Image: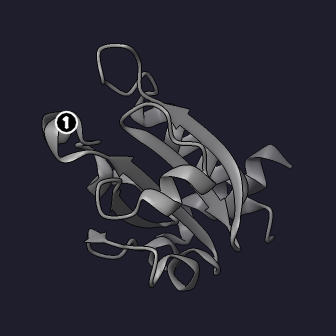
């Protein structure tokens, strides 16, 4: 079964194309996160240097950023206490959370984030 999942990931790259990076707000958050696998990075303007730089490499998802300064209601709703924080949604529900550390850097690696995405993506097969 694991081999089939790996083959599906290799053979279906066009299904997993990510969208261009976009900043979203409370106004369009629900619409952007309710379908498929969506990665949302929450960060603050003072910490832009620690944005998740490898977002273009992510496959099988859509990727967006939320500026917590402009969307304090989302910060509160999703209990964002450290920056950056990445939430992975599937069909509107939070499935995984990766938080920044005391140095305001993301502890999770690209591989850990991609693995979480792949697991969610493969659930539909």
Q: Residue at x 58, y 79 (%)?
A: 30
Residue closest to the eye, 69 or 38: 69
Residue closest to the eye, 78 or 120: 78
Residue closest to the eye, 112 or 35: 35
Identify the element where label 1 is drawn: helix
Q: Position of residue 5 (x, y in %)?
A: 73, 55
Q: Residue at x 66, y 44 (%)?
A: 96
Q: Which residue extends farthest right?
A: 1
Identify the image quadrant of the C terminus: bottom right
The coloring applied to the image is one colour
Q: Position of residue 119 (x, y in %)?
A: 70, 50
Q: Position of residue 75 (x, y in %)?
A: 49, 52
Q: Residue at x 47, y 34 (%)?
A: 111
- Residue 44 falls in which quadrant of the image? top left
Q: Is residue 59 visible?
A: no
Q: In the figure, is residue 22 to the left or right of 122?
A: left
Q: Is residue 43 visible?
A: yes
- Residue 14 falls in which quadrant of the image? bottom left
Q: In the figure, is residue 16 to the left or right of 48?
A: right
Q: Position of residue 98 (x, y in %)?
A: 53, 35
Q: Residue at x 65, y 57 (%)?
A: 7
Give the residue pinned by disc 1. 47
93 lies above or below 87: below
- Residue 4 falls in which quadrant of the image? bottom right
83 lies above or below 24: above
Give the class, few, some or many, for how many residues have Cα within 10 Å of label 1's Cα (few <14, many ≥20).
few
């Amino acid at each position: 079964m694991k081999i089939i999942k790996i083959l599906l990931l290799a053979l279906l790259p066009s299904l997993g194309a990510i969208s261009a990076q976009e900043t979203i707000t409370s106004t369009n958050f629900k619409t952007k996160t309710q379908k498929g696998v969506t990665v949302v990075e929450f960060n603050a303007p003072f910490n832009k240097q620690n944005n998740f730089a490898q977002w273009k490499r992510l496959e099988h998802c859509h990727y967006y950023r939320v500026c917590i300064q402009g969307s304090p209601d989302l910060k509160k709703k999703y209990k964002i206490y450290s920056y950056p924080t990445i939430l992975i949604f599937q069909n509107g529900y939070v499935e995984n959370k990766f938080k920044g550390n005391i140095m305001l850097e993301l502890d999770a690696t690209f591989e850990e984030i991609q693995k979480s995405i792949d697991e969610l993506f493969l659930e539909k097969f």
